[in-house]
Image (cartoon, rainbow, N blue to C red):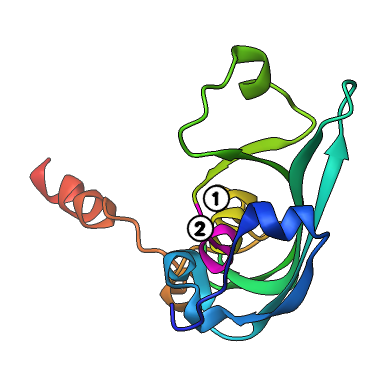
Amino acid sequence: MSQQLTIDGFAFAREGGALQGTLLVSELTRVHDQLAVVSGEVRFSVQGKLMKTVIGVGEPQLRLRIRGILQLACQRCLGAIAFDLDVDSLFLLVSEDAELTQDEIENDSCDVLPVGRELDLAALIEDEILLALPVAPRHGRCDMPGDGEAGERANPFAVLTGLKGRLN
């Protein structure tokens, strides 16, 4: 990926940082296998904040929003499907070496994101896009590749019908 977006996640959250921008779909190389057309861009915004807990300690959090339209490959006809990408994720930042309890891991209000000194936002954005894509995108109704070109299908047993009369 040519564009490097790295931040110190903890400092970004502590300072209430905000960042927005765009990434070209051509730079999202791990997404290419899912696409019919590799073109366009996705818009993102990242907002950092400290969320106060019951005991008054601030927990660093990041809210990531990603918007765009991707041209996914239909699993039936291999044609393009316009997919409206709309991701809104909330992450609780924890140190890479932090010991997490089972309750923290299973918390559905936000995802726990272990980070070191630097956080690669471009990789995180690509990860979130991959998680948001449907497993098997399909048009509501479409034909299999080559169905329209085949015309009327020949009966493979038609030749046997002609031979049946000759053998008796």
Write down the residue under mark 2.
Answer: 75
Q: Count of labels shown?
A: 2
Residue 9 place in picture, x, y as percent: 64, 56
Are there few (<14), some (14-19), or many (20+) residues within 10 Å of tag 2? some
Can see residue 78?
Answer: no
Q: Nearer the viewer, residue 153 or 161?
A: 153
Write down the residue under mark 1.
Answer: 136
Residue 65 place in picture, x, y as percent: 77, 61
Disc number placed over residue 45 in the picture, else none:
none
Residue at 35% x, 63% y: name it: 154
Residue at 65% x, 72% y: name it: 70
Q: Confirm or deny contact between disc 1 and disc 2 (CB under 8 A).
A: yes
- Magenta-highlighted residues: 117-124
Relative to 79, does residue 106 appear above or below in the rendering? above
Q: Confirm whether the magenta stretch covers residue 38.
A: no
Residue at 19% x, 48% y: name it: 165
**Within the image, what quadrant is residue 125 found in?**
bottom right
Give the secondary structure at mark 2. Answer: loop
Q: Nearer the viewer, mark 1 or mark 2?
A: 1
Residue at 66% x, 21% y: name it: 104
Can see residue 96?
Answer: yes
Q: Quadrant of the N terminus?
A: bottom left
Relative to 51, does residue 143 appear above or below in the rendering? below
In the image: residue 115, left or right of residue 12 = left
Give, as a three-letter code, the residue at label 1.
Ala
Q: Nearer the viewer, residue 160 or 140?
A: 140
Residue found farthest to the top: 102
In space, the residues marked 1 and 2 are separated at their CA atoms by 6 Å
